Image: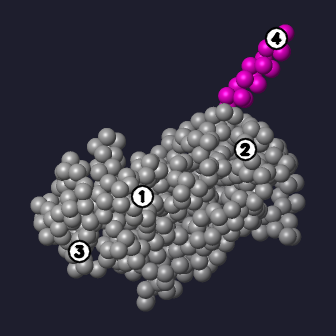
Amino acid sequence: MEEDRRGRKKMESRNRMLWSLQNTAWEYDDSRQGRDAASLKRRRTTTESPVSSCSPSSDLAGNNYDVFLSFRGPDTRKSFTDFLYKSLTDAGICVFRDDDELPVGEGIKPALIEAIKQSKVLIPIISRDYASSRSCLMELVQILECKQTTSRETIPIFYEIEVSDLKDQRNSFEKSFFEHQRDGVDCETIQKWKVALEEIGRLKGFVTAKIHNGHHSKLIDELIPIVQQKLKKGRLLVTKNLVGVDHHVQEIMRKLGVVHRNGQVIEICGSDVRVLGIYGIGGVGKTTLAKILAEGFRNKQVLILLDDVEDVDQLDVVVGELSWFGPGSRIIMTSRKSDILLKYKEAETYEIEPMEEDKALQLFSKRAFGTGSPSKGFESLSKDIVLASGRLPLALEVTGSHLFGKSKGTWKDTLEKLKDTPHEKVENVLKISYLALDIYAKHIFLDIACFLIGKDERIAFYMWEDCKLYPSSGIEVLLIMSLVKIGENNELLMHDLLRTLGRKIVLNEDPIPRNRSRLWVHDDALSTLRKKEVNLKAITTFFSTRS
């Protein structure tokens, strides 16, 4: 009876989890504290909403837009508005624009009102003849109502007009209202429209004629980051300086069975549920890649993104059984461990390796010089620093940003420092994996970092077995966590930054070489032996690495 009761309770719990997951899209939250799966941010959606693209359609219900554009077509459709629309969508922002003018006598469509309500940022483009369009005026009334009742972000653009003409209803605005009155629009409606124009004229916005000497492209370049900032609470922010990610995205989308074009998911092939794990050492770009993939799925209610998963128990809580999910669902997770998905037989994995040298140089240059290549006189230094950074994206970005605008002397000092220790921010990221190891795996890791890179693992095994370090399980864990690799000839391999990290850990044990657990610098070892300062423990440590 007790077992049956527990079984029913477990099933009820799973059913509740299933209902919750079916009504929730999961996304990574940069502001979370800790790494437990419960700290993943939830974004509520409705299961009844159809999957939709960012383009307007006759059935607007269910579409959630980032930006709503209100404009008069003949004034700006093929010029400013078209350029703005393309710039917003190229930035991964979902935009609604309505090109249809209302027939005489008809009110604004309920679906259009819903599109305004669902949009997070409202941008009315007030042009000279904006007020001649009844649909524009109706949209403006609704925009201001949303601003007042739901604090919706509103950014007006005053296109080639004097804002005073708008607020005072002079010139073209006065003419438009005269024509509306002549066409039979009642006085109450006209008054409502006039108040809306006066109110929008008092808001802070962009006056095209007065910004960047009327250069629209520069105005839009300034506007896009502001819109992104307004949207940031619901978005996965990705660095602008992306290099070398396209082939990763293409390969992962292929594994997921997804047609992907221009940064957006076009079609999800098949109704099966697919799981993919992205793994690699810290700082290699797993989270950045996952964010890019998530943005591609934006407005598709089929994606679950789990970042930095460390424990199978987290998967049991959040993912559980694949049968819980609806047809076509895609689950992407990142981890430092390659075995995190072993319980799912059909799961795919994808390892991210350090960048190719030319791509690494390009990423570093974007941070260090603001361009895609080194400045004259810094070519050789840049290449040396890229190599010293191990072609790891995090290290390249941190080091490049640090060197921006610095003297050549500072560059040379930085290169020498990198040979001895990673940048503090990079070191902290890499050290997370080391600290997660048990004491035996830590010893093996430090042995490899200090002595055994390039050496045959089979020879090292005899030593570790004699030292009771349990090398079979230790090496397996190091491989799973991408801390070491085994070459084609059984040689032990390790990323340069991990080697530097391991050696620094040993150096920090004690300022006096003879008191450290390992001595790999020839002069330190020879000096210690010659001075007869070494004790039995140090000798054992030096030759067998056992501490």
Membership of 6 in magenta stretch: yes
Which kind of residue does numbered mark 1 sit on?
Val
* Circle 1 residues within 10 Å: few <14, some 14–19, many ≥20: many
- The residue tagged with tag 2: helix, strand or loop? loop
Residue beneath disc 3: 160
Is there a contact, CB below 8 Å, between mark 2 and mark 3? no
In the rendered structure, are the residues bearing label 2 and label 4 in contact, judged by CB atoms less than 8 Å apart? no
Nearest to viewer (mark 4 / mark 3): 3
Instruction: Judge the density around disc 2: few (<14), some (14-19), many (≥20) Cα neighbours within 10 Å.
Output: some
Q: On the image, which quarter does residue 383 sit in?
A: bottom right
Image location of residue 387, percent across then percent down = 59, 75
Q: Nearer the viewer, residue 520 or 171?
A: 171
Stretch in magenta? 1-17
Question: Residue 67 has which mark?
Answer: 1
Characterize the local packing of mark 3: few (<14), some (14-19) or many (20 or more) Cα atoms within 10 angstroms.
Answer: some
Q: Secondary structure at mark 1?
A: strand
Residue in view at x 78 percent, y 19 percent: 8
Most common secondary structure along the magenta stretch: helix
Q: Nearer the viewer, mark 2 or mark 4?
A: 2
Which numbered disc, 4 or 1, marks the residue that appears first in the sequence? Answer: 4
- Within-10-Å neighbours for mark 4: few <14, some 14–19, many 20+: few
* Residue under label 2: 326
Mark 4 — residue?
Answer: 2
Inter-mark Cα distance, 3 to 1: 22 Å
